[in-house]
Amino acid sequence: MSENGALPHRGKVLTVDTMNANVKKVDYAVRGPIVQRAVQIEKELKEGVKKPFKEVIKANIGDAHAMGQRPITFFRQVMALCTYPQLLDDNKFPEDAKNRARRILQACGGNSIGAYTTSQGIDCVRHDVANYIQRRDGGIPSDPDNIYLTTGASDGIVTILKLLTAGEGRTRTGVMISIPQYPLYSASIAELGAVQVNYYLNEEKCWSLDISELQRSLQAAREHCNPRVLCIINPGNPTGQVQSRQCIEDVIRFAAKENLFLMADEVYQDNVYAEGCEFHSFKKVLFEMGPEYSRTVELASFHSTSKCYMGECGFRGGYMEVINMDPEVKAQLTKLVSVRLCPPAPGQALMDLVVNSPQPGEPSYQSFMKERTAVLSALAEKAKLTEEILNTVPGISCNPVQGAMYSFPRITMPERAINEAKAKGQAPDMFYCMKLLEDTGICLVPGSGFGQRDGTYHFRMTILPPTDKLKIMLNKLKEFHQTFTQQYA
Amino acid sequence: MSENGALPHRGKVLTVDTMNANVKKVDYAVRGPIVQRAVQIEKELKEGVKKPFKEVIKANIGDAHAMGQRPITFFRQVMALCTYPQLLDDNKFPEDAKNRARRILQACGGNSIGAYTTSQGIDCVRHDVANYIQRRDGGIPSDPDNIYLTTGASDGIVTILKLLTAGEGRTRTGVMISIPQYPLYSASIAELGAVQVNYYLNEEKCWSLDISELQRSLQAAREHCNPRVLCIINPGNPTGQVQSRQCIEDVIRFAAKENLFLMADEVYQDNVYAEGCEFHSFKKVLFEMGPEYSRTVELASFHSTSKCYMGECGFRGGYMEVINMDPEVKAQLTKLVSVRLCPPAPGQALMDLVVNSPQPGEPSYQSFMKERTAVLSALAEKAKLTEEILNTVPGISCNPVQGAMYSFPRITMPERAINEAKAKGQAPDMFYCMKLLEDTGICLVPGSGFGQRDGTYHFRMTILPPTDKLKIMLNKLKEFHQTFTQQYA
Ligand SMILES: Cc1ncc(COP(=O)(O)O)c(C=O)c1O
Ligand SMILES: Cc1ncc(COP(=O)(O)O)c(C=O)c1O
């Protein structure tokens, strides 16, 4: 203190100069400047500011309910019963919903979803997850001890990346991720101070994965870091491709040969639309390749309540299954997750319902299947529609949306637009998306937020808006692209 | 591959030797070996193994519902309505519950708590939190822009520590924490690779905080790191003390003088029992000290749905308020939390109810107040009971449980027991607690899990079991301690 008792003028303890440098490097486009501007525009519209459009259409994020998709009735019935068990006496709820709720509550401390659960997740939920995986994978066994419930898939992915991050300088862990990628990966890698190792998906072959490109990427990375992890998103975000069984086998063989830990992000496992495409889990293919692989290759795979037909993002439910993880490391993993006590119990309960949905003969089966099918076939229709309409626009080319919830079309940008963007210090497709937002109210994410080959430009658009709105949006987009192209010709 | 096509025998990619070294250093006693053994014993009891007791009493963790506390009816009604809005047509639910639910749903994307929320948390919830803080603090303003909703308080605490962690070697961030401490702190500090800086609470003065000890600790730490953060838990876990207004003022003055970022963990703000004790928030005291402090001292304070009278741990709800945070750092914080998308929406909704509970005149007010008061007065009674009974045992001395949910009594251990423990490589109080568990089924956490002065031994016991069970437990403990003392005399 100075003599008159006043504190000397002091600077902040925490500034951008003195904060965690890794955090500063984190980038997160899905909720970046475009989205912030969209929120502002919505406020302006409410305040009566005149715009050439009446509403902002948010096709920037895979948030099904926000785009009008209805929750699955059965799931919400069970969740309400778990939340307020007095409803178990209510005749309005079907018996199978009540049975599910009773079973979950019995597994909770004090029969309340307000109790902390074990850190790995509620026992009976982990058993149900293991049974689900076993059914899904044609009988290949799954051990509940290998299941960890998570706070959304995001949490599981970050946790495994955290375990794997070690070394310094040239021995620092390298994490191989597809480009384009879901930006959780690049963000977490930056936050952990690991090294991002890019491999490019093949846009010309419908965003498929070439082993030769994996090899190139790995070799290049070995010059400057220690690549130890290979991340795969299947079905793909943002690219919407579904990998063939052959490709998955090749990837596993590559990981085995090159000593890589595999992370399989399979949150879109029910979102497969294209003829001839099918979801194959990495776990299943690994085990079908025989003991040489199934007993050695380390794999963590991830699922979530946020996607598929349920779209329950807000509940933050998810699980991961770890295969061939060193038992001592597993003990460390269990310890690590215990620090934050447990994943949200409602999210765990919801995950349970996803893996233990109504069965033939149960009272809710018919209506559940009807709702599920309706969502998935609407998505399939919208996937097709998106591809078709976008491909009618000169200067836009869009691969088939085989799965997931996104199209990632390539856009041809006039030289003048590219130069104007650069002059503004913006990525050209950011410039494009920002103008699209201002002119039409459509909110997309520029390809630069996901990564793309130099000199190519894309945007990511979800296929989630209701069909009629999606059509309007696609046609507005078409019009915008034509005007934009003329304007900068 | 070898010539016959078989893969060479390869080691694991991820082993304890090649994993994240910081994660390895993490310790988490609250869910450590004692608790794992307790779970085993429960299984053995179920399988019919004979034990000198019939059930395990878990007094190791502040998990109210698991110990039989009932959820607040109003909260669960609103949560059920949010989960399954069809119930809004049901006459069984009171109007104020319905109004709360409608308001929350209107603030959610697509009117569903299954939508992702903004990363900082639902707008109207953050407004309600700010209003709550303003009321609580006698009108001192709170800005919703400074409120971040979190996945339990744990999440907020780790996030702020993450921002603050920087530097290398002697410039590495030091984090001052009380000893004994809540092990989330030591665990997160280890995980982030920050430096743990201990200051000891004064057991002789009812676990109060002495500024001279802060000064000693800081000075010592400055020899080897860059102490930038001072963490306070008030009311205290594991020690149950409630800080005086004077003490808080002194701490703030100290932080200002020494340029420390303050973290105030106030998750037990409603849990104050002792005569003459009162909860004072750091925010309030800071602002009452005048602009010299209120405009400069950086403070993050934390609250949670897990404690107080609601005990809704499973929902993982919480918030933090940041004061005087550099705007650029705040932007970084907002970016950082967006990577994991959002905190669980049900937890956010529940946090809203805590800060916006039924008001006089509303239909649920009476019953809400009755339930709330019943929980808090039972806790007050149990706090007293615990102190009284423990202090009748020669060799156990227990400070008053002024607040929170724990007693942290000191135990005198016979020399022979200490030696036997050391021979086994166990902390003496771990040895004590393990034996207590095996002999009586009572599950406590040894003081060594929280930190304590060398040569002293403690355990932490929650006061959460129902009064009759608590009495039985305390008497069993008394008996055990006497036998133990004789046995090792
Ligand atoms: C490929 C992929 N992985 C993981 C996630 C994370 O989802 P959540 O954390 O909601 O489960 C997403 C969300 O969009 C995703 O697209
Ligand atoms: C002092 C203190 N802080 C924070 C927490 C974390 O609680 P939660 O993450 O459930 O909000 C606890 C839990 O026991 C605690 O005692």
Image: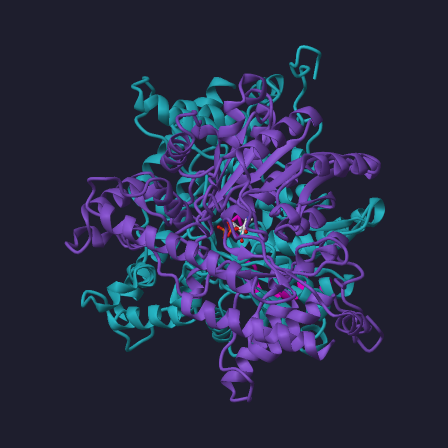
Chain colours: A cyan, B purple
Assess whether residue A240 is covered by the magenta stretch: yes
B11 vs B390, left or right, is right
Q: Quadrant of the N terminus of chain B?
A: bottom right
Residue B297 falls in image quadrant: top right
Look at the image and tell me whether residue A235 can be seen: no
Answer above or below: position of B349 versus B163. Answer: below
Assess whether residue A62 is covered by the magenta stretch: no
Tally the numbered discs. 0
Q: Quadrant of the C terminus of chain B?
A: bottom right
Q: Give whichever of A281, B102 is nearer the camera.
A: B102
Answer above or below: position of A277 versus B326. Answer: below
- The percent coordinates of residue A9 (x first, y second) are 67, 15
Residue B227 falls in image quadrant: top right
- The percent coordinates of residue A448 (x first, y second) are 59, 34
Look at the image and tell me whether residue A206 can be seen: yes
Answer above or below: position of B373 versus A473. Answer: below
- Taking the spot 69% from the left edge, 77% from the top edge, the residue there is B486
Residue A54 falls in image quadrant: top left
Q: Give whichever of A420, A390 is nearer the camera.
A: A420
A380 vs B430, left or right, is left
- The percent coordinates of residue A476 (x first, y second) are 36, 31
Q: Give whichever of A294, B233 is nearer the camera.
A: B233
- The percent coordinates of residue B328 (x first, y second) are 60, 25
Q: Which residues are magenta?
A: A237-254
Q: Give whichever of A238, B464 is nearer the camera.
A: B464
